[in-house]
Amino acid sequence: QVQLVESGGGSVQAGGSLRLSCAASGVDYSTYCKGWFRQAPGKEREAVAAIYTGGGFTAYADSVKGRFTISHDNAKNLLYLQMNSLKHEDTAMYYCAADVSVPPPVWFRSVLYNHWGQGTQVTVSP
């Protein structure tokens, strides 16, 4: 059974940084497409970033490009999201997601990911 567990969320002032982690069990994480999504209260879940097997392909939402970096440690079955220059509008619950096969052109479609973590809250004060 695939299990994803996020950690690293918290409260920070605008301009600060956080690093989220997602630990996977029950799966060889290295073979999966892995992504981060977020959902703010009253808003739809939106894609943040994704990384593919081998790390050769990464993708980012326009709103986080240049500020967030997705990476993975396949040996440890860990996924990361380094978030710098945080803005108030980055406040949301952040989820990691994974699936065996998500076509890169549609990496942002949450319905294509079958495995999800429970989320970790990120709060950025103005």
Image (spheres, rainbow, N blue to C red):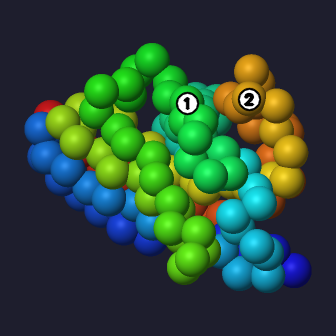
Q: Which mark is residue 104?
A: 2
In this picture, residue 3 sits left or right of residue 88: right
- State which quadrant residue 2 falls in: bottom right
From the viewer's side, name the closer residue of 41 and 58: 58
From the viewer's side, name the closer residue of 27 and 21: 27
Q: Quadrant of the C terminus?
A: top left
- Which residue is rendered at x = 55% and y = 36% of the image? 58
In this picture, residue 64 sits left or right of residue 2: left
In this picture, residue 19 sits left or right of residue 97: left
Residue 124 image position (x, y, % from top left): 24, 44
Residue beneath disc 1: 59
From the viewer's side, name the closer residue of 79 and 96: 79
Residue 73 image position (x, y, % from top left): 50, 67
| Amino acid type, label 2 | Pro
Say what secondary structure mark 2 lies in.
helix
Task: Look at the picture and state if 88 lies above or below 12.
Answer: above
| Amino acid type, label 1 | Ala
The number of numbered badges drawn on the structure is 2
C-beta proximity under 8 Å, tags 1 and 2: yes
- Which residue is rendered at x = 74% and y = 29% of the image? 104
